[in-house]
């Protein structure tokens, strides 16, 4: 498999452009101000293991399709949450038409299907589009649940 190319991310704090790898240990930080950067990548059948399953922070997976209106409406909300939760969550978007294996793995019967993963395991899921005021507390709870599980497993 060829290496997954990095994404250029503009730091929301200082405006510096940063090269962010699709897969890495830890979390990306701005090379200038050292603040956490939003981590948004595309996942495919061939890259999902590297970009999502092996991530060291919780992963918000968005199973979507370009023809799906609700998928397109929730996408800006997820990107906003990714910026808000920079350093605490990684957003991985998976086009189910191009990656049917991932859709099958998570038994996606409807999209958008939002999943929070930790170590490749599903912590929680949400089917359908929802506004930011619904998804923010859902994501906060999922992140807290994953950090509680991680502390219990290591202690």
Image: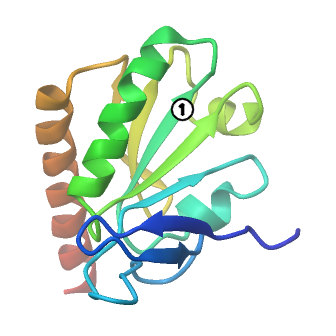
Residue linked to disc 1: 63
**Vertically, is 9 above or below 83?**
below
Name the residue located 64 percent from the left edge and 31 percent from the top edge.
103
Q: Please identify the quadrant where the N terminus is shown.
A: bottom right
Q: Where is residue 71 in the image (x, y as percent from the top left)?
A: 47, 20
Q: Which residue lies furthest to the front in this view?
A: 15
Name the residue located 39 percent from the left edge and 19 percent from the top edge.
73
In the image, 75 versus 45, the foreground residue is: 75
Circle 1 packing at 10 Å, graded few (<14), some (14-19), many (20+), is many
Q: Where is residue 90 in the image (x, y as percent from the top left)?
A: 40, 59
**Vertically, is 149 above or below 136?**
below
SS at badge 1 = strand
Q: Where is residue 38 in the image (x, y as percent from the top left)?
A: 36, 62
In the image, 11 versus 86, the foreground residue is: 11
Count all numbered tags in the image, as a single digit.
1
Q: Please identify the quadrant where the C terminus is shown.
A: bottom left
**Vertically, is 73 above or below 52?**
above
Q: Where is residue 141 in the image (x, y as percent from the top left)?
A: 13, 48
Name the residue located 64 percent from the left edge and 50 percent from the top edge.
43
Q: How is the image coloured?
A: rainbow
């Amino acid at each position: 498999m060829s290496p997954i190319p990095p994404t250029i991310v503009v730091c929301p704090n200082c405006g510096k452009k940063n090269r962010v790898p699709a897969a890495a240990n830890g979390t990306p930080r701005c090379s200038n101000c050292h603040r956490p950067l939003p981590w948004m990548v595309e996942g495919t059948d061939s890259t999902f293991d590297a970009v999502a399953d092996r991530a060291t922070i919780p992963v918000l997976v968005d199973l979507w399709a370009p023809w799906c209106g609700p998928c397109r409406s929730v996408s800006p909300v997820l990107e906003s949450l990714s910026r808000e939760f920079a350093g605490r969550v990684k957003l991985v978007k998976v086009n189910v038409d191009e990656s049917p294996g991932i859709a099958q793995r998570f038994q996606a019967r409807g999209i958008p299907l939002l999943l929070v993963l930790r170590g490749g395991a599903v912590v929680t899921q949400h089917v359908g589009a929802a506004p930011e005021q619904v998804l923010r507390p859902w994501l906060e709870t999922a992140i807290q649940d994953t950090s509680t599980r991680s502390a219990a497993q290591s202690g």
